[in-house]
Every structure is written in structure tokens, then in C-alpha cells.
């Protein structure tokens, strides 16, 4: 039995499998689906602090969370301690999330160009200021998500500062920002961070199946695992990994039937929460039908369908 409880602040989850924050992916419907399959804690995609403070925030926040979506974390992105504090106080009040996470790892130019995401890692003092500002102002536990740096000392310096500033947990994606998604996640660096901190450390990067999950936990000694890309179109991964960590055995599943069933549930959840958008659905359809027989045709047909029922009928008929 390798599935351990995870305690961050006051919340304690029965297991330690987390769904990563992912822009355009981890909307409420997808988070609920991952939760049904055993994700212990999920995060919203990053939300820009400026946007949260703007007049148009209503559309941005439509369907952000629901009462079944617990425990969940809201991830914010920004570079001004003051704006991040105001944005965090707003979401704390409005949604009462269990966690507020700060994105300090996004390597995309649109984000780093404004000094946010992984660009923050070049300014340790600012990292400390941001986390202190938030931990002083909020009742909600604050966590941070980082990438590793060129030199191990720099990674450790940032990790220590985040802990010292009062963060309740730290997630480390074991790639440098310059790598984007190339190469592989460096679990040795994650292990080093884990060995130096007292707060929970969550390992992230390249956890894609039962074996990689088990070895990441064993090797790093981390308190939890965060899973991103492997869950896209495949939320069932949480059930598989969970089962394996609990029993040492693998679940036998008909992958095609499972993916289609999950996609159907995803469509239903989108409709239930009034989140239906053809663009979003096309993207998810792409992931959910990956590797399936006739997937190209299914995706092409979905492009012409406008409502959930028609899409579900199409999925069912493709399954026969
Ligand atoms: C489509 C996509 C969107 C992402 N958006 C975010 C985000 O909003 N915030 C964040 O901290 N990381 C984001 N990430 C990074 C993931 O959270 C995660 O750190 C990364 O994918 C490595 O984990 P994995 O190998 O399990 O995918 C994103 C990744 C992908 C693929």
C-alpha cells in the first residue's frame, strides 16, 4: 500500500494523487470527472490576477467551481504582490477554495513576457514577497508550483524561500523553463527539494502510468504526485494508479470503452454546468478519442455538431 494521505493545512485527503492545473483543460467538468475517478485534489487552470481584478471578470469566472468540486485549489498567476493579494482575497471570498496556488512555473512567452510564471524564479526576493504577502493576508493555505532552475542551489534557494514565506506545500515540475516539455522530468532534483523542506512536496512531470507513479513516489519520497498530460482524455488514469498503489495489481480495462464512456460523462457535465462550448469540446474530443479506432472520423463529425445529445449519440454509434 503506497497511497498515503496528504495533509495541506487543514485539509487531509485520503490519497495523494493531484490533478495538475492545465489551461483549457481543467475546467469544472473535467475536474469533476477526474474526481469521480479518484483524484484527491484538483486545481483550476491559472487565472490571471489582473483579469480577476477587472470589470469583465464575470465571464472569466462563469462556472469556475461548484459544491461537489471539493477539495479544490484555485491557481493564480501574476507578478505584483499587491495585485496577487487583492485577486487572492477576491477568490477566497467568492469561492472558499481549500487552497490558493501561485503559478511560478509557466514557461510560455505570453506569461513570462509580463514577468509572471517561471520568470519569477529569476527574482527570489520577489518570490518571497509574493508568498509572504499572500500568507499574511489570506485564511486559505497558500501553495506554489515551480519548475527547477539551471543550478540546484538556485532551485533550493527558491524552495526554501517559499517555505520560509509560509507556503503550506510546494509542487515541483522537474523541468527547467527553457526545456518547455522536452527532455524528461528530473526526479533527482525533486528528491533533493523534498529532502530539504519540511512542508509537503508534490512531484510533477511525466507521471503517465502505474509504474511511473510508483517509482516517482519511491524515488523522491514526495508527499504526493501531480498528474497533468496523462489525464487529458484519460481521467481514468487516477483510478488505475490509485488501484495499483493500493493493491499492487493493475486494473484490467477496455480502454476504448472507458474513454468513450468518460467522454460521454464529460459532455453531460459540461451541459449540467452550463459550460458547453464547441471549441472546448473539439479539443477534449481530440484527446478522448486518441488511439481509438475511427477517431479521425469521430473528431471530424464532432466539428459539425452543436449539442451534447447529438455528440453522445455519435459516440455511442461509433462504439458499436
Ligand atoms: C495544456 C497544458 C496547460 C497547462 N496549464 C498550466 C497552468 O495553467 N498552470 C500550471 O501551473 N501549469 C500548467 N501546465 C503544466 C502542468 O500543470 C504540468 O506541470 C506539466 O504538464 C508537467 O506535468 P505532466 O508531465 O504530468 O503533464 C499546463 C500543461 C499543459 C500540457
Image: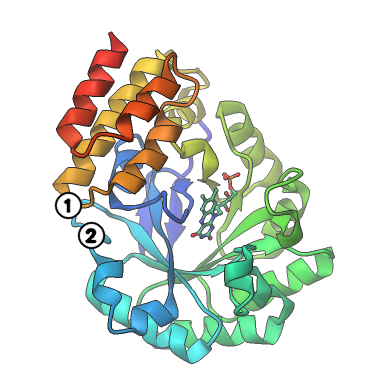
Label 2: how many residues lie within 10 Å, few (<14), some (14-19) or many (20+)?
Answer: some
Which residue matches tag 2?
63
Describe residue 122's horizontal placement relative to residue 172 as left or right: right
- Residue drawn at x 67%, y 57% as measured from the top left: 194
Q: Is residue 31 visible?
A: yes
Q: Is residue 236 above or below residue 27?
A: above
Q: Is residue 88 visible?
A: no
- Residue drawn at x 63%, y 57% as measured from the top left: 172
Whether tag 1 and tag 2 are in contact, CB under 8 A, the answer is: yes
Q: Residue furthest top?
A: 320
Please tell me whether mark 1 sits on a helix, a strand or a loop.
loop
Image location (x, y in percent) of residue 169: 53, 64
Image location (x, y in percent) of residue 107: 64, 63
Q: Is residue 70 above or below residue 310?
A: below
Describe residue 99's horizontal placement relative to residue 206 as left or right: left
Which of 99/31 is in front? 31
Q: Earlier in the sequence, mark 1 or mark 2?
A: 2
Amino acid at each position: 500500500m503506497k497511497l498515503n494521505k496528504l495533509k495541506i493545512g487543514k485539509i487531509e485527503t485520503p490519497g495523494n494523487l493531484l490533478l495538475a492545473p492545465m489551461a483549457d483543460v481543467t475546467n469544472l467538468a473535467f475536474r469533476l470527472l477526474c474526481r469521480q475517478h479518484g483524484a484527491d485534489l484538483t486545481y483550476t487552470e491559472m487565472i490571471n490576477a489582473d483579469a480577476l481584478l477587472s470589470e469583465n471578470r464575470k465571464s472569466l469566472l462563469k462556472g469556475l467551481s461548484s459544491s461537489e468540486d471539493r477539495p479544490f485549489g484555485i491557481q493564480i498567476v501574476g507578478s505584483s504582490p499587491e495585485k496577487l493579494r487583492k485577486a487572492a482575497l477576491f477568490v477566497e471570498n467568492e469561492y472558499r477554495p481549500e487552497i490558493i496556488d501561485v503559478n511560478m512555473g509557466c514557461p510560455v512567452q505570453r506569461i513570462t513576457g509580463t514577468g509572471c510564471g517561471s520568470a519569477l524564479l529569476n527574482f527570489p526576493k520577489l518570490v518571497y514577497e509574493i508568498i509572504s504577502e499572500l500568507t499574511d493576508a489570506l485564511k486559505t493555505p497558500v501553495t506554489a508550483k515551480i519548475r527547477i532552475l539551471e543550478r540546484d542551489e538556485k532551485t533550493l534557494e527558491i524552495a526554501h524561500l517559499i517555505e520560509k514565506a509560509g507556503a503550506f506545500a510546494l509542487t515541483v515540475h522537474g523541468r527547467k523553463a527553457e526545456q518547455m516539455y522536452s527532455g524528461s522530468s528530473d526526479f533527482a532534483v525533486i528528491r533533493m527539494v523534498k529532502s530539504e523542506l519540511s512542508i509537503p512536496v508534490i512531484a510533477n512531470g511525466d507521471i503517465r502510468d502505474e509504474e511511473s507513479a510508483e517509482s516517482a513516489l519511491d524515488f523522491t519520497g514526495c508527499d504526493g504526485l501531480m498528474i497533468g498530460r496523462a489525464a487529458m482524455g484519460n481521467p481514468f488514469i487516477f483510478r488505475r494508479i490509485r488501484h495499483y498503489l493500493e493493491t499492487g495489481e493493475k486494473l484490467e480495462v477496455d480502454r476504448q470503452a472507458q474513454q468513450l464512456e468518460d467522454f460521454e460523462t464529460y459532455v453531460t457535465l459540461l451541459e449540467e454546468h452550463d459550460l458547453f462550448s464547441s471549441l472546448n469540446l473539439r479539443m477534449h474530443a481530440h484527446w478522448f478519442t486518441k488511439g481509438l479506432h475511427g477517431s479521425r472520423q469521430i473528431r471530424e463529425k464532432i466539428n459539425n455538431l452543436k449539442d451534447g445529445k447529438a455528440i453522445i449519440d455519435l459516440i455511442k454509434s461509433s462504439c458499436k
